[in-house]
Amino acid sequence: MIEEEFANNLTMNLTGSLGEVVSTLPPELAAPVATLIMILQAVGVLFFVYIIFLIVNSVLAIRRNLFAKKTWKKIQEIEKKLDKVLKINKKEKKKK
C-alpha cells in the first residue's frame, strides 16, 4: 500500500516536474521536447505490450510442451502393447 502511494507520488512528481520544465522552455525548444516525450510514451506502451506478449507466449509454450509429453508417453505405451502383440503373433506362426 505504501509502495503504491510512493510510486504514484513519484510518477505525479516526475510528470509535473517534466511539464514544468517543458512549459518554461522557449517555444522553439518546447515543441521538439514534447514530441520526444510523446515518442517515449509510445515506446513505453509498446514495451509493456511486448512484455505481456512474452508472458502469454511463455504460458502457451509450457502448455504445448506438457501436451507433447503426454502424447509421447501415450505413444510409448502403444508401442509396448504393439510389441507384445507382435511377439504373440510370431510365436503362433512358429507353432503352425
Image (cartoon, helix red, strand yellow):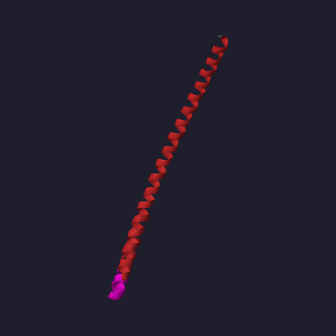
Specify the quadrant of the image occupied by residue 75: top right
Q: Is residue 22 magenta?
A: yes
Name the residue rendered at 64%, 20% in the picture. Answer: 87
Specify the quadrant of the image occupied by residue 81: top right
Q: Which residues are magenta?
A: 19-31
Q: Residue furthest right?
A: 94
Q: Residue furthest top?
A: 96
**Image coordinates for residue 62, horizontal then vertical, percent:** 50, 47
Name the residue rendered at 41%, 61% in the picture. Answer: 49
Quadrant containing the N terminus in the rendered view: bottom left
Left or right: where 44 falls relative to 90:
left
Quadrant containing the C terminus in the rendered view: top right
Please say if 32 is above or below 48. below
**Image coordinates for residue 41, horizontal then vertical, percent:** 38, 71
Please say if 90 is above or below 5. above
Q: Is residue 86 magenta?
A: no
**Image coordinates for residue 20, horizontal then vertical, percent:** 35, 82
The residue lying toward the viewer, choosing from 46 and 22, is 46
Name the residue rendered at 63%, 14% in the picture. Answer: 92
The residue lying toward the viewer, choosing from 13 and 88, is 88
**Image coordinates for residue 16, horizontal then vertical, percent:** 36, 77
Q: Is residue 5 visible?
A: no
Specify the quadrant of the image occupied by residue 46: bottom left
Name the residue rendered at 33%, 84% in the picture. Answer: 23
* Magenta stretch: dominant secondary structure: helix
The residue lying toward the viewer, choosing from 19 and 62, is 62
Q: Is residue 72 visible?
A: yes
